[in-house]
Amino acid sequence: MTARVVILDRDGVINAESDAHIKSVAEWHPLPGSLEAIARLNRGGFRTALATNQSGIARGFFSEADLATIHEHIAGELVRLGARLDPIVYSPDGPGSDAWRRKPRPGMLLEIAERLGVELDGVPYVGDSWRDIQAARAAGARPVLVRTGNGDATLAAGHDLEHVAVYDDLAAFADAWLAAGDSPV
């Protein structure tokens, strides 16, 4: 049986993507329905976790303390809806890094699996970019693409998306996943 876990990317999935990097709470804007989707998943018995590249740290755009403040804000917004993301795992490494945790490498997903004591077979990793799909495949998780953020560009790029479910946004994914019951689609 698949673990009752859903792993999410952050930028472009939960909140609006920014080429300038999200450096503060003031720059963080949730996508419509995304926080409510997490709450629905939680109420449906799914634990939700976060795996996000945050290269702005390596680039000097913001600090790990700044990122912690943003994640505390997200947690507070979710608490108001009776929801949570746990654990939250990130890679502070920059582009070109061969760090094990930085997507498209599988390190963050494998760390989440270890921390939760689950196997990733069948566990969805919902992302908006090719590197999210690659990380999910490398970790043995189920890749899911949303069209928000970089999703439409990822679809248009001609990558191998065989066996990748595609949804308009996180809310549409959550609705479909919950409607499928014990046999998620």
Image: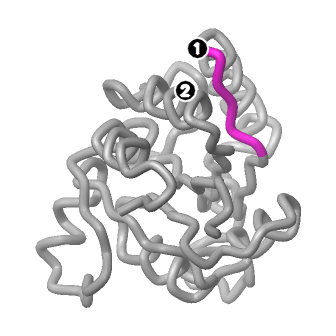
Q: Is residue 127 above or below residue 72?
A: below
Report the label total. Answer: 2
The region drawn magenta spans 82-86
Residues packed near mark 1 inside 10 Å, few (<14), some (14 to 19) or many (20 plus)? some
Q: What amino acid type should be assigned to the residue bearing mark 1?
A: Leu
Asked whether residue 28 appears in the rendered view, the answer is no
- The N terminus lies in quadrant: bottom right
In the depicted view, which residue is nearer to us: 144 or 91? 144
> Is residue 84 highlighted in magenta?
yes
Residue picked out by circle 1? 81
How is the rendered protein coloured? one colour
Query: Hey, which residue is sitting farthest left in the picture?
Result: 156
In the depicted view, which residue is nearer to us: 82 or 25? 82
Residue 22 spot, x, y in % from top left: 52, 39
Residue 49 spot, x, y in % from top left: 67, 49
- Residue at 35% x, 26% y is 33
- The C terminus lies in quadrant: bottom left
Q: Is residue 72 above or below residue 51?
A: above
Q: Is residue 62 left or right of residue 182?
A: right
| Mark 1 / mark 2, whichever is N-terminal | 2
Which dot marks residue 39?
Answer: 2
Q: Is residue 61 left or right of residue 178?
A: right
- Residue at 26% x, 48% y is 148
Q: Is residue 183 left or right of residue 116?
A: left
Q: Is residue 46 above or below residue 130?
A: above
The CA span between labels 1 and 2 is 6 Å
Dots 1, 2 in contact, CB < 8 A: yes
